Image (tube, rainbow, N blue to C red):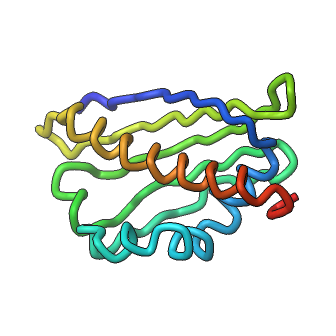
Amino acid sequence: MAVLTLTDEFTSPVAPKRVFKALILDADNLMPKLMPQAVKSSHIKYVKHRTDALDEEKLTYSYTLIEGDDLLDKIESISYEMKFEPTPGGGCKGTNVSKYHPKPGVQINEEEVKAGKEKAMAIYKGVEAYLIANPNVYA
């Protein structure tokens, strides 16, 4: 039962505090407004997350997906650690470490994981575009 750990990094011209507020603190309100078709067409009926740590000063967020109808036939849990750091010029660098904990005897398909990560990146890009177009939001 090997844990699959993936690290993704991305950069943005948007300040880290604004990205953190939009993606982490206000995601429940912002996502349905920005991407209603994505929210409506999601094939996952439910997921349950546990917040493990949230630090608004350090701009870090850790949470674990512990229940979900579409996923947990293969996986015990998925833990995520997100961090947003400033970059020269006022933008930010984001880091996301994902740890997939499979059920005994299950091999995790990395292609399925990559497909999910591509969807997450599309959401991030949508939020980033919104923040660039609305520079006073979450300022």
Q: Is residue 5 above or below residue 118?
A: above
Q: Position of residue 105 (x, y in %)?
A: 11, 38
Q: Position of residue 94 (x, y in %)?
A: 65, 34
Give the camera-side residue of 81 and 135.
135
Residue found at the very far front of the displayed protein: 133
Q: Position of residue 18 (x, y in %)?
A: 78, 52
Point 15% across, 34% down: residue = 107
Q: Quadrant of the C terminus?
A: bottom right
> Residue 68 appears in which quarter of the rendering?
bottom left
Give the camera-side residue of 113 and 19.
19
Point 82% across, 55% down: residue = 135
Give the camera-side residue of 116 and 12.
12
Left or right of 40: which side holds 88?
Answer: right
Left or right of 73: which side holds 57?
Answer: right
Left or right of 138: which side holds 39?
Answer: left
Left or right of 79: which side holds 119?
Answer: left
Point 85% across, 22% down: residue = 88
> Residue 67 appears in which quarter of the rendering?
bottom left
Point 72% across, 38% down: residue = 84
Residue found at the very far left of the displayed protein: 105
Q: Position of residue 8 (x, y in %)?
A: 50, 29
Number of numbered discs visible in the structure rendering:
0
Q: Is residue 17 above or below residue 22?
A: above
Q: Quadrant of the N terminus?
A: top left
Give the camera-side residue of 95 and 98.
95
Q: Is residue 116 above or below residue 49?
A: above
